[in-house]
Image: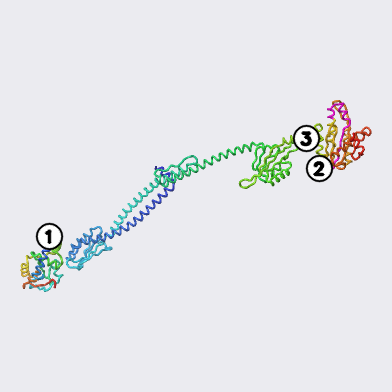
Amino acid sequence: MLKWFIVSMNKSALLVRLAIVIGFASIAIGFLSSQLFYKLTFNQEVAITQQSLGSLYKTIAATAATAAYLAEKDLAQEVVDGLATNEVVLNAKMNFENIDVVSNTNTFVEPVVFPIQSLFEVDKSIGTLVIAPNIQYIEERARQLAFDNSKAMILQAFVVTIVAIFVAFFLITRPMIEIARALHKTVPGEGNRLTVPDFHQNSELGELVNDVNVLLDKTEQQFTRERKLRKEIEALEKRFRMLFENSMSPIILMEPRGNIILFNVAFETILEKLNLQLKKSFGPLLENLFAEPEKLLGCVELAFANDEIATGEFKLQTSEDSASVWVQVVVTSVVNEDLREYYQITLHDISKRKKELESLAYQADYDKLTKLYNRQGLEKEIDVFAEQQRPFCLALIDLNWFKRINDIYGHESGDEILIFVADRIKKTLRTQDFGGRWGGDEFVLLLDGADEATTKDIVTRLVQRISKPYFLRKFNQNVAVGASVGAAFYPENGVKIQEIINLADQAMYIVKNDRDTDPEKSLKFAHELVTQEIIHVKRK
Amino acid sequence: MLQLTLLKTMILMGGLSFTTLAISSELVLVVHKDNPTSMLSRSQVIDLYMGKYVAFPDGSKAVPVDIENDLVIRTKFYDSLVGMSLARVNAYWSKVKFSGRARPPTQQKDEKAILAFVKQTENAIAYIHESSVTDDVKVVYRFYE
């Protein structure tokens, strides 16, 4: 209990303060009251002494009067000595008929004078009795009384202090310290509650404890609710993360200026594929990743202007030697709670599909054997020229003696010749020109903006190259094919494509027909044809 | 006892008033006719009877006389002179006697004896009724003059 007390004294200034206040108050009250009591006691003692002196005088008045009357010195001496034996009397003196009778040698301080009345004659004074009170004794007695009283007061104050401290300790401080400790150890959510201290069921402390418990209940409820909510959020987040992280498509959240805030693994994968390091920003809308960023930006701008989600298929910027990567881009503008705008970008890799589509298109427009445009591909290019009304020359080439080689050496050799011719065409054409296989052993050249001279130059060179002997390894035999070429100009010879093609075809037939007669001539222009010949050819 | 005293006092008072009425005389102090003293003051009478100065103004010794048997007269005398009862007077003397200096007055049986004593004693002084005064004595003090 003592240890407890000391610990709480150390720990809590409360009890110390209380003890100090009560102690000081008791001492002050004791001091003041003892001072007051001393004064009162002293005055009272003095008054009592005066009274007792009066009483003393009364007891000896008759004797004194007799002594004075008879001038009896001995009797008077007896009287004053008798008075002086009293504690309150320091000295006594009688005076009558010019005689002084004194008890001792002490001086008379604050003496009390009593007249001695004649015994036999009324109102006749026959002498005086002077009594010197023992002031020192009176003071001493008053002091002693006051001192005793002060002792009692201080003892009382001490007892009151101790009692007050103990009562305060057991009734207030200790329960409070216990509550404080319990509260200190209490962690909301663990279900611990404070216990009401003994005898405090109905006190303010009890109320405090109950209120604290209610507060703890509420806190705990809130904790539980929040914990549950947090769990739910965590689970949800996990699922979202799973979705996000396991997504095959890169998902990026960024600021409109281009700073990337969030991205998933798939984005890293695609960066690896592009041989790029992860950076904080790849420009607005990741434009640095794209081969044609302006297309993407335009698309997004248009969509956002119409308050729509921007979608489009765009090619990513890849190095020359690697396969092209196409992605479908979905850009969504997201405004969060603090009213800041973010862009969510999803990239779907569509390279494979694109490739398939491309290869399908390739198959449709290209000749499998020669890897040149087929008739459809050529027609598309012609349409492009026509749409743009770009002048061009269409040269229709028909191989000579091909049928014969095909018959003699077989299809494979024929194919070999066709590939060889295609190769010559590729090598002869300028970059802006197109060449293709029109069908069978017929080829078509589209010479961009070529005039007659240019056409003649290109065609002559090509025919020379085609006409060179070709070595058939299989048959260990040199073979040679020639070429008959008819050319027509757009738009000079016609604005309709079919018309141009027909004219070139007719010119080519003329060359072919005249082959035997004019073997050197391999090219004829449509405008060189005469009407008759056209009719003739048509009929044929 | 108190009742008895009261009764006594009442009887005495009754007697006194009767006596006063019957005799119709006051007490006077008398001395021997040859005594040179002609008049005494009240204080002088007190001093003589209470033992202070037992002498006449001329210095000659005085012998005061008390009446022994007539308590009525004695009571009246002391009451008139010092306003004291006989009991107090007796108490006074009993106190004073020890000191040895003062003595109470001598006593004579009655007025007759007193008159005879004063007649014989030149320095005697006594109190008697005025009506009892004879030629042998001389009045030196009167009450209620």
Disc 3 from disc 2: Cα separation: 22 Å
Say above or below: A526 vs B77: above
At mark 3, the secondary structure is helix
User: Residue A526 at x, y = what percent?
Assistant: 89, 39
Q: Mark 1 lies on which chain?
A: B
- Nearer to us: label 1 or label 3: 3
Residue under disc 1 on the same chain as residue under disc 3: no
List x then y, in percent, for residue A372: 81, 34
Quick one: A168 or A235, which is closer to the camera?
Answer: A235
Q: Which of B123/A519 is in front?
A: A519
Residue assigned mark 3: A362
Dot 3 falls on which chain?
A
Magenta range is A391-416
Marks 3/2 in contact by CB < 8 Å: the verdict is no
Question: Dot 1 corresponds to which residue?
Answer: B4
Could you confirm whether marks 3 and 2 are on the same chain?
yes
Residue B21: assigned label: none
How much space separates mark 1 and mark 2, taking CA atoms? 177 Å
Total marks shown come to 3
Residue B28 can be seen, yes or no: no
Whether B127 is among the magenta residues is no
**The stretch drawn in magenta includes residue A403:** yes
Q: Which amino acid is tagged 1?
A: Leu
Amino acid, disc 3: Tyr
User: Which residue is nearer to you in this view: A259 or A201?
Assistant: A201
Instruction: Give the foreground label among 1 and 2.
Output: 2
Element type at mark 2: helix
Residue in view at x 76 percent, y 34 percent: A360
Q: Mark 2 points at which residue?
A: A387
Mark 2 neighbour class, 10 Å CA radius: few under 14, some 14 to 19, many 20 or more: few
